[in-house]
Image (cartoon, helix red, strand yellow):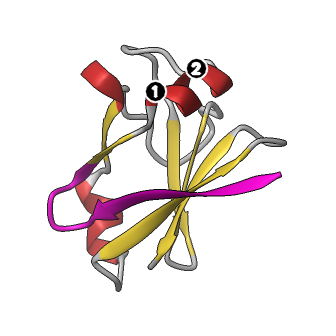
Amino acid sequence: MSVVLNKFYDNKKGYFHIPVVWREEFQFQVGEKVGVDVKDGIIIIDKMRVRQFTPIIGVKGRLTIPIEIRQELKSHIYQLIAIQETEQFILTPA
């Protein structure tokens, strides 16, 4: 099941916060590495470390999107979608 969250990522800032309820649901811990990749302008975040980048989840679920990904993005505002089956977060242009 996919859940469109009322959370947005501003590409200009370079980071966003994963909501605590979803961090707990997917068992994302502060200090844990996650996989981040971009495909067709959509950012994919999950626990797979085979992704292009592996940033660390910071305090309060803060995650920095690597500059290489931010430079590829065409849009500045992205909406957060949680996909429960695959335990992924997707950032899609708003």
- Residue type (three-letter) at the residue carrying disc 2: Glu
Residue 10 lies within the magenta run: yes
Query: Could you say which is closer to the camera, residue 80 or residue 66?
Result: 80
* Contact check, label 1 and label 2, Cβ < 8 Å: yes
Q: Main secondary structure of the magenta part?
A: strand
Q: Amino acid at mark 1?
A: Val
Secondary structure of the residue carrying tag 1 is helix
User: Disc 2 on helix, strand or loop?
Assistant: helix
Which residue occupies 36% across, 77% down? Answer: 73
The spot of residue 84 in percent (x, y) is 77, 41
**The C terminus, quarter of image:** bottom left
Residue 55 visible, this angle: yes
Residue 15: percent from the left, percent from the top? 25, 48
- Provide residue 10's location: percent of width, then percent of height: 25, 65
Residue corresponding to mark 2: 24
Q: Is residue 37 left or right of residue 83?
A: left
Q: Which residues are magenta?
A: 1-15
- In terms of image quadrants, where is residue 72? bottom left
Label 1 sits on residue: 20
Query: Is residue 2 toward the left or the right of residue 63 in the image?
Result: right
